[in-house]
Every structure is written in C-alpha cells, then in structure tokens.
Image (cartoon, rainbow, N blue to C red):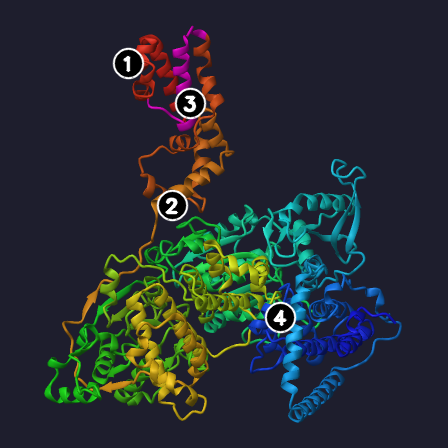
Amino acid sequence: MASNFDFLAADFPDLFQFAQRAENYAQSDPRSSCFWARYTLEQLVSWLYDNDTYLDRPRDTSLNSLIHERTFQENLNPPSLFHKIRLVQRLGNRAAHDSQPLDAREALQCLRELHHLLYWLARYYSPNGRNLGAVPFDPALLQPADRPQSTASQKRIEALEQELAAAQQERDRLETERRKLEADYARQVADRQQELASLKQRNRAVPDRHNYNEAETRKYQIDLLLREAGWNPNDPRAIEVAVSGMPTSTNPSGKGKIDYVLWGSDGRPLAIVEAKRASKDPKLGQQQAKLYADCLEAQYGQRPVIFYSNGYEHYIWDDLRYPPRAIAGFLSADELERIIFRRRQRKPLEIMQPNPEIAGRSYQITAIRSIAERFDRGHRKALLVMATGTGKTRTAIALIDLLQRANWVNRVLFLADRTALLTQAKRAIQKTMGEKVSVADLTRDQDAASAQIVLSTYPTILNRIDQTDSNGKRIFGSGCFDLVIVDEAHRSIYQKYRAIFEYFDSLLVGLTATPRDEVHRDTYAVFDLDPGLPTFAYELNEAIDDGYLVPPTGIDVPFKFLRRGIKYQELSPDEQTEYEARFADLETGEIPDQINAAALNQWLFNENTVDQALEVLMQQGLKVDQGDRLGKTIIFARNHQHAEYIVERFNSNYPHFRGQFAKVIDSKDGFAQTLLDEFSDPKKDLSIAVSVDMLDTGVDVPEVVNLVFFKPVYSLVKFNQMIGRGTRLRPDLFAPGDNKTAFLIFDLCSNFAYFAQPIKEVSPKLRDSLSARLVKIRLQLSQAIDSQAPDPQLADLQTNLLSELHQHVATMEPANFLVRRQARLVQEFTDRDRWNRLSREDVQTISDRLANLPNSQPTEPPQVKAFDELCLQIQLARLQALDRPFIALRDRLRDVASALETKRTIPQIQPHLSLIADIQEEAWWQDVTVTQIETVRQQLRSLATFIDREKQTILYTQFTDELMGEITEAHVPTVQSGFSREQYRKKVEAYIRAHQDHIAIAKLRRNIPLTPSDLIALEQMLFESPEVEGRDRFEQVYGADYSLPKFIRCLVGLDRQAAKEAFAEYLTAQRLNTGQIRFVEMIIDHLTQNGIMAPALLYEPPFTDLHQDGLDGLFGDDRADQIVAIVESINQNAEAA
C-alpha cells in the first residue's frame, strides 16, 4: 500500500519504517500514532548528530536539549521547521505521559508536521535529494478507521517506550563494541561525514520547491485558538458557510462564504470569523465580516459577534455596543451567549442604584456612579484614586454588585500583589454579598476556576493562563471574566503584568491609594485616561477633612546613631575597644573612622538603640484599656534580621508578656496570615506587629494607633501608604464614646525631614530579568562589533552572538500567551538570516518587545548567566574604550577568579587553574582583547556554580546611643491632593462640549435668552456631574464671581447662523460697502469662536486694520452705535432672565 513516506524507503529505511507506523495508526489509534511520530523524530535528530559535522552535540543528549542546541537550530531551513519539531515533540509527550485523550485530528496534524520534517531530511541529505520534487501530504493514503479505535492505554504506550529505550541501549552497546574492534572506524565515519557534507552542499544549491505550507500553519493557528475556546474548527457546519444577500457591487450573485461560523445551541449564529492571509492586515476583513454578519442577521434574526484575524492579530467587534478592539483569542460558546444575552437584558447603569449597605458613604456612591457613567458611554476601563482607609475594596464590591444586578457582569477576577490582601478581600466579599456569589482564592482553593469571583495574585494567574482542560480548552480563556479589578494599580504592576490585562477581554477597573498627581502617566494610559484625570479621586486630606479618616501626629525621635552613624572618637574607651575588635581589617589592622548610619539595622544591630526605641514607644505610645495597655502598633523594620532582633530585645526587656505581645509578621513565615488575624483581633494579646513590607500596604486594622518608622523610606507613594495603616476610624476605641481621633507616628530615621524637602520623585524603572539583560547586552555587543574595523576573530564572535540571539527567539513557544502577543515579530526573527541585517530600529524593537519573552531553552543556573553578563559587559566596555567601567568590571572578574582558586580541589576546576591564576595578574589584562575575554567566558562559565555566595556578616554591638535633642512633635508631610487646575479645566471644558445638546447650552449657542428654570437645569447638570466635582471645586478653579451662562457661551461659542441672524436686519436696512461688510463678518467670526464680545475690541486690531479708528471711523457714530447695541444684546442673551 502506498505511503506518504515512500520517498524515505531507499535511503532511510529505518525512519521509513517508524514513520509508516505513525501513519498506520493515525485514524484508528491517535495516541499510538503520536507516540511513533515522536519516536521517529528522536531517530531523525539522532541521525543528524551522528552524520552532520556542522552540529555540536551537547553534553545533555535528551531530545529537548538536542533540538535547542544552537548549531542544530541554525541548520534548520526554513526556520519554521523548529515549530514543527516542537509540535511533534509536544503531542508525542502527551501520548506517552498524559492521560488526556488525543483525537484523530491531532494525530493528523502531528503526521503532517512529521512529513515536512522527513521531506526536509531527504531533500538535503539523500543522494537524489536535488531531484526530489514536491511531495504533498495526502490524507487519502491513511488507513481508514473502519474498526473501533484501538484501546492502547497510556500504560501500554509507556511500556512500549521502555522497550524501545532498552532496545536502543542494546544497539548503542553493540555499536560501541564494534567501534573498539574496527581500527579504521574513525576513518570510515570521517569519510562518510565528509561525503554527506558535500552532498548537503550540492542539494542546497538547487532551489527547494517544497511547500512547507505556511498558509496551513496560519489556518492551524486560528484552528488552535478556536479549539482552545472549546470549538471544533473541523465541524462541517462551521467551515466555509454559504450566505446570500451580499451587496451585488462586491459579488453579482449576492452570495459569499464565511470562513467560520460559531453556532449556538439553538442553531443561531453566535459569531463569525473572517480569516485573512498572514501577510495581510486583518483589519482589511472588517467590512467583509460586517456584510457577512448582516446576511446572517437577516436570515436568523440574531446578529453574530464579529471576529477577524490573520493568525497573528485578532479583533473582536460587537458592533451593537463597542468599536472593534484587539483580542488575544476567540470566545467560548458560553461567553458569546453572555454577550448576546446582555444585548437584551443589560440595563442602563444610570438607572441602577449602588447598594448602600455595601458602600454607603457619599464619595463611594459617587465613585461607583462615575464608573457607571463611563461604562454607559462605551468606555471599558476606569481608574479610582482613593486614599487608604476610605474603603476601596468595599467600593469595588458594591460596583460588582451593581454590575451583576444590571446584567453587565457575571464573572470577576480580583487581582492583588499579596495573598494577605486576597484573604482580606475574600472575607469582605463573603461578608457583604453572602451566598449570592461563589468566591474562590486561586492561590489556595482547588475549584477556583469555576467561581463567579476569582481572587488571585498576579504571578498565579499569569502561570495559569496557558492551562487547558482534558479537551484542550483553556481554563481561563480571553473572555473568561467580564470584569477585572486591579488592586493597588500602579506603574510597576503594569510594567510587569500588563500582559494579563491585555489578555482578558473584559471591563477593567483599577484601584489605587496613590495620589492622582503621583500616579504615573503610563498608568493613566493603560486606562485610556489623560494624565492627572482618574475616573474618580478621593484623597487623604479630603477624607481627613470630611471626618472619614483620622490625621497623624508626628513624633520625631532623633537617635544619634540612626542619624549620624557611629563615630569612633565619640565612643567611650571600653566601647572603642569593642569597636576595634569588631571592625578592624583582618589583614591590615586598620579601623574605619566611623560606621555610616545606613549600616544600622542593615547588618549592624546595636542593642542600646533598639532598647531605647522600644522604651520610647512603650512610654509615649497611645494606650488603650484605660491607659494600661499599649494600643495596636506596627513597627516598620528594615529587614527580616532587624525585625527578629527588635522582637528579641522586646522579649528580653518585657519578659512578663511571655512572648505574646510582640511578633514578627512578614512573608518569610508560612503562617503569617494566622499572625495577622491574631493582630487584627482587639481581644488578642498580640499588640506589636514588627513587619518587613507585608504590612506596609493594604492591611486593614482600624485599632492601630502607633506606627514606628524604624527604617528610612525613599518612595513618597510608599510613605503615604504606610501612613495609611493608621488612618482608619475606630469608634469607642479608648472607652465608650471615646473614639479614635488621631494616631502617632514615631519617626526614628528622618523620614519627615526627607519628604518635607521639595523633591521630585523619579519613578524607578523596572529591572529586567537576567535573561532579558543578556539578550540586550548581546545585541549591544554585536552592533558594537559591527562598527569596528574588519577582524576575522571579531566577525566570528559577532556571528556567535547573533546566533545565540536567534536561538532565544527561535525557541519561543508559539502557544504561550505572552509570545502570541508578538507572534508576527517572533516569526520574522525566527529566520537566522534576518539577524544579519539589523537596523537601529530593529535593535530597539528586539530590546523592547522580544527580550523579556519566555522560551523553551533548557534553564541554566543564574550564576552561569550572571558570569556571562559580566564577561559581555567587559567585552562591550573594551570595544567602546570605556576605561573606568572596564576597570571596575575587570576587578569583579578577578574577584570571581580568586574565589574559584579557593576551590582548587574540585575536579572540574583543576584543568583551568592556570587560566584562573593568569586572570588575577595585572599583566594578563595589558592589551587584552575581546576574543581573549570570550575564551575566559566559554571556559569558566560552567564553574560559576561552585562559587559560594557572599553573605554580609551580621554584627551585634552594645554601644550606648543617645538622643541628639528632645523628642518633639513634628509635621507629617503627607501628599497633598495633587490637584491640577490645568487638567481640571480640560476635563470640565470637555464635559461641557460633549453636552451641547442640553437645552440650556443649545439656547446659549443659538442666542436664545435663558429662563430661570433653564439656569437651574444648567447648574444641576453641571455641578452634579462627577467631572465637575461640585460647585465648590468649580469655584475654586474659576472663582466665585463668574457668570455660568457667559462662561459656557465663551466655551462653546455662538452658532454662526444665529450670529448672522442677529445682524440680518441691520445688513438689510443699510447700504454697506465691501469694507463695512467685511467688518461685520469679522464680528460674526469672533462671536462664533468666542461666544461673547467686549465692544472695546471693535477699536483694536484686527478691526483697526480696516480703518485706523476702528468701528467709528468706518461706520460713523450712528451706525456704530447700532452695531454696539447688537453686540451687547447678544452678550445679554448669555444671562438668565
């Protein structure tokens, strides 16, 4: 019987046999077919390494390592063959090790890709390869599944795999023995390899006409996305669906064929997919898809959702509600049915009322209404700025409740950066919404995926997005959630995790306590907002003024050591002796003049300083229980060791509390949540929480009345978040009727003074991963070499650098949702030749969009990659003649060599001891070349794992600290509102222009006098809108002495026709010359633009350009008075009667 692999039979009989087995099982037993396909791939790869001298066999000979080796990648032509290899490998692994079923469709795809790979092998490595014409894959040659599918189990496949592995080991053993017996074996191998290299060269000289079917690959990508959404793309009802009713201008027959139709359970269309060529912009399919949707709507009475895609870029268009938008994948049947359902059942949000039992404060209700109005206007993103303690979470819950009652939202994803915040949010949701909704924490709950409200940290959901169920459907598809809420939405979150928000096709709401003026413009851009203009803002000082938060009272505690450091000359003789013993250099005996204040509580812990600080807290901190007990207190420590030392000193000084009063609460403790629960309970003994970062933000404990800043803080945003731990109200805290009205902040590290300075804080740039940094520096180095004079050795180094960069991209997994976002770019740079012609723009694009993407290369230890980075930095500094950086980097490498030399007994290090010793000598670095450093990198990189990680020695001292002055009350420099008058004006003016159809504004534009009721309606419309933020805010910016109608007339201008009509009677009654007519037209132009006009302007340029005396000179007194009267009447109509 004919086979798709007959072209292999003569030159590769073993591979032909294995491939034929995969072919024979394709229809009847997909699991066995995929297994044999992978086994064939393994033998193919093994043959290549045995016979092609170009390939460098790695130490790790697993299939995964072999296919990722650089020379193996470079040898693949076209580069897309690698993705075919990965698909066969992946499906073969599933066949051998995964209980999920495989179907005939997947086996067929696996066989197609194997066919391409084996054709490529025969085309380039067989004697007749150059004459091998196109050999298309023919599914008709497969054996039909005319019998029940084989019941080959996963266990049987695993047993077969073991049998084949044992057989391979036996063949390898016999081959090794044969090599020992045959003296001329090496010569035979060399001759064969030389002949093969020549053969490959000759075959490559003939153009390869085989169709490796990139169009099919594009279709496969769309099909894969459909399967991930739960659709069967091979369903005959879904493919090439004929429709009628198309415009005859595009097709005289009025008929067309839709690429895909996704049908609902009721037989009506839910969506259509228009597929364009990969080389085409998918937007070119938008109008065609709309016309198809029109046809289906006419036929079935239901308008389908529209998708159009080219396999790389995808768009969704629910044209009854929203404009088109990019999307990461297709939607499932349930998700599409929700869209169709909402078209009929979704209520306007303007008629919905927030539940006051969940969030009943006026500003919370205004915040929800602000978002509702924005969503009603067709926007899909909103940002709330609300001070810590004002109830962001409750506001978000009330928003969820409102959107669910309005049938806008069913499933919600709530994201936070720490598990403690998820626990807090989950409890709040369960408390306020009860059993109306199911809630689950993705970091803990097993069945979280099916809950209505899913809570997750960013890394957790990021790692779960690519997961599929047993049918290959994504558990968290693009349309899984209707609303995503981002807690503490700030720039670093969007820099690291923006891909999450771009993946889920949902409404997006950000919550942040960061003052609006401190929110980075990039964050506003994520929410499609202008900088400084969140959807709603309610900030710290405003909340304090309104009585919803309590203000802080600052206490400055100026300990000398924490402010000035420890100076040797200021110590007592006994302390100087201890100082000498602790800090003297072991080799020279020298002692430093002082220990900088930055060392305190970093690696140097002074007992007396901590003891005195605790004494200040215990004596001056706010008390509860009639003054007998210190109120709830958070001490912000510098690091974990510092936190533990504080608790150790507290227990030593106050043993009667039995170790129950003060405890460390940070993320190092797996039971930190239980400690936090204990601290949150007013009845529990735990009253002092010593925290490292964990309690800085987001934790709600209203009983906190003391904060101790035992560390310096350099972020103004974080400083305010930390202050927010104490701002919450607590009625009856001290006694019945004696409420919490303030709280204390003990500043031990000059934070008040630091933030009182006029410092413009710079947003720190997120640090790239080590892998991304390697990509970027290799790019820099490759381009720096390009600018040098020709040098064969440098040229070789550049080639290797570009090959490593190519490998980084070529090994990216197309199915990974992060990679898919850059799929077109990834495909472009999968071609090795593309790296030989990089422009400056290319380098920037690769750095920005590809460097941080994950790939499937075997993971290397971070020490090895760090060593690579150091050597590459040295090479770049050498090439660019940067002497100072070069010297600093050189010394770091010499330190590494010195550390390696101390490990001379390790067998792997011994062969390199000579080079290790040379590197440490000054002479070796004289006139050192870039290629010499490359040799060092290659020879020593694998040894970096033997170097012990340096640890800073922790020292404990007992020097006597003292206060530099009195403990005094100090101003707490909290962030002000950050209110921008300029941005406020823009927002108000944009709002007014957007409402020109309001009856009062329309009258003002048309020169119709306003009635008192018009003015009332105008004020109500304006001052009750969230954009204007009330009359007080408006008057703060525009002043109290204003005329609202005139203000609006000036803003929207006068309708040109109305202005002409005002002058019509005058123009008809007068006989005017061309100059006079032009003068009147200029008045009309001014009124159209500015709404009103001061008559004095008629005597200034540009009016004096027509006559030096302006109005009077051109018209005379009587006519001039008539014109002034008309202008004044127009101005008067911009007032209420």
Q: CA distance from mark 4 to mark 1?
A: 81 Å
Q: CA distance from mark 3 to mark 1?
A: 20 Å
Q: Which residues are magenta?
A: 1069-1094
Q: Amino acid at mark 4?
A: Gln
716 inside magenta stretch: no
Number of marks in picture: 4
Q: Image quadrant of residue 408?
A: bottom right
Q: As displayed, is residue 422 above or below residue 662? A: above
Helix or strand or loop: what does disc 3 sit on?
helix
Q: Which residue is mark 4?
A: 467
Q: Which residue is mark 3?
A: 1085
In percent of width and height, residue 480 lies at 62, 62
In percent of width and height, residue 879 lies at 37, 65
Is residue 531 in sight in this rendering?
Answer: yes
Between 700 and 1015, the one lying in front of the other is 700
Q: Which badge, 2 or 1, is on the more N-terminal residue?
A: 2
Q: Residue furthest top?
A: 1071
Q: CA distance from mark 4 to mark 2?
A: 44 Å
Magenta span: helix, strand or loop, mainly? helix
Q: CA distance from mark 2 to mark 1?
A: 41 Å
Q: Which badge, 4 or 2, is on the more N-terminal residue?
A: 4
Q: Nearer the viewer, mark 3 or mark 4?
A: 4
Q: Which residue is mark 2?
A: 983
